[in-house]
Image (tube, rainbow, N blue to C red):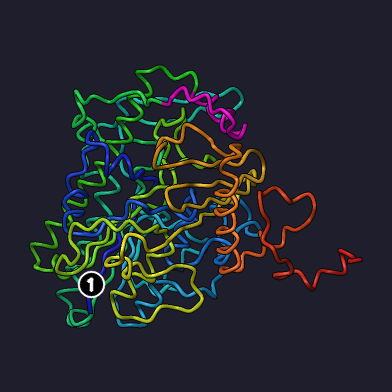
Amino acid sequence: MKNVIFLISDQMQRHAVLEDPICQMDGLRRLCQEAVEFPNAHTVSPICSPARASLITGKLPHNHGMVDCTHTVPEYRAEYDKTSRSLPNILKDNGYHISYYGKWHIERSYNLEEFGIDEYETEKVIPKSKTTPLSRIIIKTKGYKDSTICGVYEEDESQSEEHYIYNKTMAFIDNHLESKDTCDKPFCSFISTYAPHDPYVVPKQVFDLYEGADILLPEDWEDEKTQRPMIYHRLHEVWRNLTQEQIKNIIRCYYSSCTLVDIQLRRLILFLEARGIYQDTMIVFLSDHGDMVGAHGLFCKGVTAFEQQYSIPLVMKFPQARYAGLKCMAYADTCDVLPTVLDELDIPALDDIDGKSLLPFFSAKPSLFSYTVAEFFGQRYSYTQRVIWSDGFKYVFNAFDYDELYDLKNDPKETNNLVNDPKLDTLKEKLVSLMWERAKETQDTYLLDAQYFMHRFLPVGPSTGNHGSAQFEIFNNSF
């Protein structure tokens, strides 16, 4: 059996780490040369817990139940379905010795034994790193607490949490290889870094790597957001008073935070090579979601449906560097990781998942059709959204305001919302129909049964109703 390592970053934007030459990611770029990269990979949710639960279950948020972050809402608003089989459970049943170090944030129990994980240390118990502040940028908003968005500290990267959890994993692998109880088993390790999640706080040693870097103000910082949901305008107000120097400094800290993760990746590769197991080990590198990093005048993530927070790095290195250097252009999402890994390991996938194996797309013709859908249930303020990508276009269903339609091939920066262009009515109906198909496939009755007059916002409806509501017909008389 093959060893597997999952490298999960938090809030890492794909464009920054894989397309912007200013962002120093030598380890990740080396990994890409020996791996498959998915330029059209998207998260199924732009916030942590729903996306992370989808990763380990292969299910969309409405099916695994964790539709919001564990710390932001009470249990009745987001509760993980413990009947769902998880990826570590499946690997454990197939003889794997499993570890998990770093941020969990999937469900509330933090009892990782229930998920088949043998050794772990999560944010609940990881010791806090010493960080002596040298500089910081604080966001002040009247009536809200002052909050740090970025900063630089004195201690070097060896004192960071990222260094710590990578060391824990390396120790686990050494013990696994040396113990007579485990050396004949395959291992699976999950390494989940907090970086580059905000606040983007980094060691001076890494921050200094960007000395003299030509970091530019985002072209769309002053995006007027014409015909965008009004909430996008309101969110920009939080950042409007930043100076150009501050904006560039925040971006520099974000890039430095990504590089901090990359330094650990490079250490891990050297470690695996020294033990002679790098070539035989499958490595999956991804992020739970992205970050705006100044695009459209915004930082962090949330209700804004731009590519900066939905497009994620997804890189899979297969044993013996099979498919090395391939860019798989299929539309992929977080749910696809579980079935793809199981397919590679010759372990049967579950019947009740929403993801697909990506292996068939590696040798497929470019015309092979694919699309993907993401869900957002709005965190504390409950903004319902669905996002669909297909054939270079993206449609955003905003139940609370304007919908959005972008031509990502000709307008990759999403400057022009085409949703009100009558010449594109047929395209809009096609994309929305695909969204409904995905809802039917995954039994998204929350959306499918929104048949009431006050819910009819979309260009075309699901065609048929009563997907799960027949038992409630006593509340809605028919005539």
* Quarter in which the C terminus is drawn: bottom right
- Residue 270, picture quadrant: bottom left
Query: Quick one: 46 or 371, which is closer to the camera?
Result: 371
| Residue 433: percent from left, percent from top | 59, 58
- Residue 364, picture quadrant: bottom left
Considering only vertical position in the picture, is 174 above or below 123? Answer: below
Side of 27 relative to 300 (left or right):
left
Q: State the predominant SS element of the stretch in magenta.
A: loop
Considering only vertical position in the picture, is 45 above or below 405? Answer: below
Which residue is depicted at the point 22% across and 49% down? 28
| Residue 200: percent from left, percent from top | 36, 36
* Quarter in which the N terminus is drawn: bottom left
Question: Which amino acid type is marked by label 1?
Answer: Asn
Badge 1 crowding class, 10 Å Cα cut-off, few under 14, some 14 to 19, many 20 or more, is some
| Residue 123: percent from left, percent from top | 40, 54
Range covered by the magenta-colored residues: 220-239
Residue with the most extreme right position: 479
Considering only vertical position in the picture, is 45 above or below 293? Answer: below
Which residue is depicted at the point 30% across and 62% down? 6
Which residue is label 1 attached to? Answer: 3
Query: Quick one: 183 or 42, which is closer to the camera?
Result: 42
Side of 156 relative to 42 (left or right):
left
Which residue is depicted at the point 19% across and 57% down? 325
Find numbered disc 1 in the image and state the secondary structure of the residue it sits on. strand
Side of 178 relative to 3 (left or right):
left
Which residue is depicted at the point 38% across and 25% down? 219
| Residue 221: percent from left, percent from top | 43, 25
